[in-house]
């Protein structure tokens, strides 16, 4: 077996795919606390990118019976990846890639001032049931039902206005080359501020519910909502709304990225729907494992059912992977969502200089300033070691190396 079995008295087992990668004590302690919950089904699975997270462990897969832990879903609900393979070859791109980066930055609102309303917002993949306008109306109607019940979910700007925007932090848009020098477009984003609002609100309600029923928890952040509880159905409705929102947000941005590359001078005509993957890595879904219908929460993990396509990105200067799931039931058919942080953002800012970052991102058209040092490749685990640790979870279909990176 390629996982490490962790056992603790009073806790379900933990199966951790961490051979050859950094596995910090804080993450181990968080996982043990999660495994002590009576609602856990069979065991907790830890992916090789596992690390300590706010409220619950990043890189964890938690199957639960009749309950959901909102903090194990997290606050960037529906965060995930989207990628397409184009018909372009590397040699067809301009020698200077700054124009492509600038074009993407113009078309896709990004950073802390992302407000939407710029660029082409047409549908691209996973189209709405009838048409985009109808789907927007459906999303908006569902959101209004949510805020009618929970006014704290109301945001200062309507979430629909943020569709097609990237946000901040570790979210990014990249142009990559695969092993055959084919050009790929890839991005990472989620449900924006509204997902954060939903996650934070229901984490607080779950804590209230636990206190009301005198539930003893190893960590109050692991408060859960049980089926039949006052706020359970509302949370399920809200979390699925955020997951749908995030998926459409990525599809809209990808359409804008394709258009941005097409609009760049000296880039020839190309097709961009040869391969398409759009997958969550912070979410919850109802699945059947070991004969039981359970809620599977993946916080920093990707579904990897047999034959299912997924994306495992590296950092700004490292490789990324298009993968196919092997359907390993011991991981609850899951794999890692990336390389995983090896140090905090603050530690990265203290430890590395702009010069270090420039060297680590050599050959990549990207920001090379002080503001992105917390995202420098050295702040992350070695993606190749991460992939080796999970070779019984996924098989590599394509290996990508980024040549342009736009950060939020």
Image (cartoon, rainbow, N blue to C red):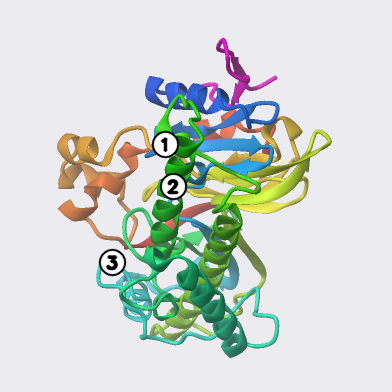
Lower sequence index among marks 3 and 2: 3
Q: Which is more toward the observer, 76 or 157?
A: 157
Residue lying at 45% horizontally and 65% vertically, measured from the top left: 150
Q: Position of residue 84 (x, y in %)?
A: 58, 67
Dot 1, crowdedness within 10 Å: few (<14), some or many (≥20)?
Answer: some
The residue singled out by tag 1 in the image is 221
Q: Position of residue 329 (x, y in %)?
A: 75, 34
Looking at the image, residue 244 sits to the left or right of residue 222; the answer is right
Circle 1 SS class? helix
* Proximity of marks 2 and 1: CB atoms separated by less than 8 Å: yes
The residue singled out by tag 2 in the image is 203
Distance CA(mark 3)–CA(mark 1): 29 Å
Q: Position of residue 157 (x, y in %)?
A: 33, 77
Q: Which residues are magenta?
A: 1-23
Looking at the image, residue 197 sits to the left or right of residue 283; the answer is left
* Proximity of marks 3 and 1: CB atoms separated by less than 8 Å: no
């Amino acid at each position: 077996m390629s996982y490490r079995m962790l056992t603790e008295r009073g806790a379900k087992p933990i199966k951790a795919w961490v051979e050859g990668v950094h596995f910090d004590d804080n993450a181990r302690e968080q996982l043990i606390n999660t495994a002590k919950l009576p609602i856990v089904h069979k065991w907790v699975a830890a992916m090789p990118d596992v690390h300590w997270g706010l409220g619950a462990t990043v890189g964890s897969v938690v199957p639960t019976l009749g309950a959901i832990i909102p903090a194990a879903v997290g606050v960037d609900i529906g965060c995930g990846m989207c990628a397409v393979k184009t018909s372009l070859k590397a040699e067809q791109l301009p020698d200077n890639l700054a124009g492509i980066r600038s074009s993407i930055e113009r078309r896709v609102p990004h950073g802390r001032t992302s407000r939407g309303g710029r660029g082409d917002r047409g549908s691209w993949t996973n189209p709405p049931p009838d048409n985009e306008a109808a789907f927007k109306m459906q999303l908006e109607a569902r959101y209004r039902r949510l805020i009618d019940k929970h006014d704290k979910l109301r945001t200062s700007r309507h979430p629909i206005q943020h569709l097609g925007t990237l946000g901040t932090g570790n979210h990014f848009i990249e142009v990559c080359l695969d092993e055959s020098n084919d050009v790929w477009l890839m991005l990472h984003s989620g449900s924006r501020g509204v997902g954060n609002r939903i996650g934070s609100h229901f984490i607080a309600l779950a804590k209230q519910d636990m206190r009301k029923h005198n539930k003893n928890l190893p960590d109050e952040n692991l408060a859960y909502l049980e089926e039949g509880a006052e706020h359970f159905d509302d949370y399920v409705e809200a979390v699925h709304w955020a997951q749908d929102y995030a998926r459409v947000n990525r599809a809209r941005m990808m359409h804008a990225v394709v258009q941005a590359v097409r609009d760049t001078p000296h880039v020839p005509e190309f097709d961009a729907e040869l391969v398409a993957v759009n997958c969550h890595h912070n979410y919850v879904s109802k699945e059947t494992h070991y004969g039981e219908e359970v809620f599977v929460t993946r916080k920093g993990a990707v579904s990897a059912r047999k034959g299912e396509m997924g994306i495992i990105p590296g950092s700004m200067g490292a490789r990324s992977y298009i993968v196919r799931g092997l359907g390993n039931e011991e991981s609850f058919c899951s794999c890692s969502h990336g390389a995983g942080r090896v140090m905090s953002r603050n530690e990265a800012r203290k430890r590395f200089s702009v010069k270090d970052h420039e060297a680590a991102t050599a050959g990549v058209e990207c920001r090379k300033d002080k503001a992105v040092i917390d995202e420098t490749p050295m702040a992350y685990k070695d993606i190749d070691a991460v992939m080796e640790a999970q070779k019984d979870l996924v098989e590599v279909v394509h290996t990508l190396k980024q040549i342009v990176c736009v950060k939020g």
